[in-house]
Image (cartoon, rainbow, N blue to C red):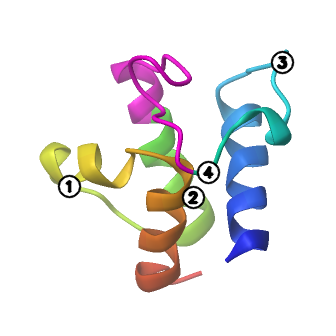
Amino acid sequence: MDELIHTLKTQIIEVLCLEEITPEDIQDDAPLFGKGLGLDSIDALELIVLLDKNYGIKLKNPAEAKGIFASVKTIAEYVAQHRTK
C-alpha cells in the first residue's frame, strides 16, 4: 500500500502541475480539498481522468468521488480494491 500511495502522490503532482510540492510534502491522511492541498473541482476532474487512464477506474457518480478523494490514503484504498489495470 505504501508504494501505491507514493505512486499516487507522484501522479497527482504531475497531473495537477504542483511543481513546488514533493510526494513527501503530502501527508497520507491530509485533505486534498479545502485546507489540505487546496484542490478545486477542476482538479477533481483531473483526478477522475487519472484514475481512468492509469487504473481503469471509471467514476460516474460525483458524490462517490468526493469520499474517494478525501485524501491520498482513501484514493489508494479505493484503487487497491477496484483497479482493472
On screen, 15 above or below 7? above
Residue at the image position 44 percent from the left and 59 percent from the top: 74
Q: Which residues are magenta?
A: 29-45
Instruction: Looking at the image, tell me whether mark 1 or mark 4 is earlier in sequence order.
Output: 4
Q: Secondary structure at mark 1?
A: loop
**Badge 2: residue crowd in 10 Å (few <14, some 14–19, many ≥20):** few
Residue picked out by circle 2: 53
Q: Is residue 33 magenta?
A: yes
Is residue 52 visible in this depiction of the protein? no
Mark nearer the N terminus (2 vs 4): 4
Q: Is residue 73 left or right of residue 3?
A: left
Q: Is residue 32 above or below residue 40?
A: below
**Local SS, label 3:** loop
Task: Select label 1 or label 4 by which is in front.
Answer: 4
Q: Main secondary structure of the magenta part?
A: loop
Sequence-earlier tag: 1 or 3: 3
Query: Does label 2 or label 1 sit earlier along the sequence?
Result: 2
Residue named by callout 1:
60
Front one among 30 and 48? 30
Image coords of residue 79 (percent x, y): 49, 72
- The numbered dot on residue 37 is none
The residue shown at (18%, 43%) is: 62
- Residues under labels 1 and 3: Cα distance? 29 Å
Residue drawn where x is 85% and y is 32% of the image: 22
Q: Amino acid at mark 2?
A: Lys
Amino acid tagged 4: Asp
Cβ–Cβ below 8 Å for labels 3 and 4? no
Disc 4 target residue: 28
**Residue ID for mark 3:** 19
Give the quarter of the figure containing the C terminus. Answer: bottom right
Quarter occupied by residue 17: top right
First-in-chain label (2 vs 3)? 3
